[in-house]
Image: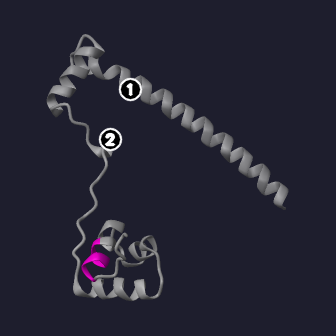
Amino acid sequence: MVADKIKALAVTKAKVAELEKDIAAELNRELSALPAKYGFTSVAAFVKAVKSATGGRVSASTGGGEKKRRARAVITDEIRAQVKALVEEGKTGAEIAKTVGISLPSVQNIKKALGLVKDRA
């Protein structure tokens, strides 16, 4: 029974690989046809026009590599109390940050404000 499933999995993986190959080829054909479709004589002219239209920016959703900024945490009295309790339990800053859902620097700032940080000698 397991052997049959392994064979079926191998066949399915081969089909997926073939589909991925076909999709990549079709995508390349469609992309290479874009400049002519929009009346450009060269890829360079098309790329220049696209850059001009977007102001040279690439959105994060298109793989531009831009990092999204994390939403700024609102530090409430409840969060401060949670941090204090977790510090008293002996949790690390990273554990506290993950538990409470805030950044490690925010945890450190709260600990400092509450006087829970040891002075460096």
Residue at 77% across, 56% down: 5
Please tell me whether residue 73 is drawn above or below residue 2 in the rendered image. Answer: below
The earlier-in-sequence mark between 1 and 2 is: 1
Q: Amino acid at mark 1?
A: Glu
| Residue 6 image position (x, y, % from top left) | 78, 53
Q: Which residue is mark 1?
A: 30
Q: Is residue 9 above or below residue 102?
A: above
Residue occupying the point 26% across, 42% down? 59
In the rendered structure, the answer to whether residue 13 lies left or right of residue 33 reads right
Quadrant in which the C terminus appears: bottom left
Q: Nearer the viewer, mark 1 or mark 2?
A: 2
Q: Amino acid at mark 2?
A: Thr
Q: Nearer the viewer, residue 44 or 16?
A: 44
Residue 54 rendering spot, x and y as whole percentages: 17, 33
In the image, which residues are magenta?
A: 109-114
| Snapshot quadrant of residue 69 | bottom left
Q: Position of residue 96 (x, y in %)?
A: 41, 77
Q: Is residue 113 above or below residue 2?
A: below
Magenta stretch, main secondary structure class: helix
In this view of the protein, which residue sits in the foreground, 86 or 115?
115
Is 53 on the left-hand or right-hand side of 15? left
Q: Are marks 1 and 2 in contact (CB under 8 Å)?
A: no
Quadrant of the frame with the N terminus: bottom right
Vertical relation: 6 (above or below) 50: below
Residue 34 picture quarter = top left
User: Which residue shows up at 36% across the image and 25% down it?
Assistant: 31
Residue 39 in percent (x, y) is at: 21, 16
Reading the image, the residue beneath label 2 is: 62
Front in this rendered view, residue 120 or 18: 120
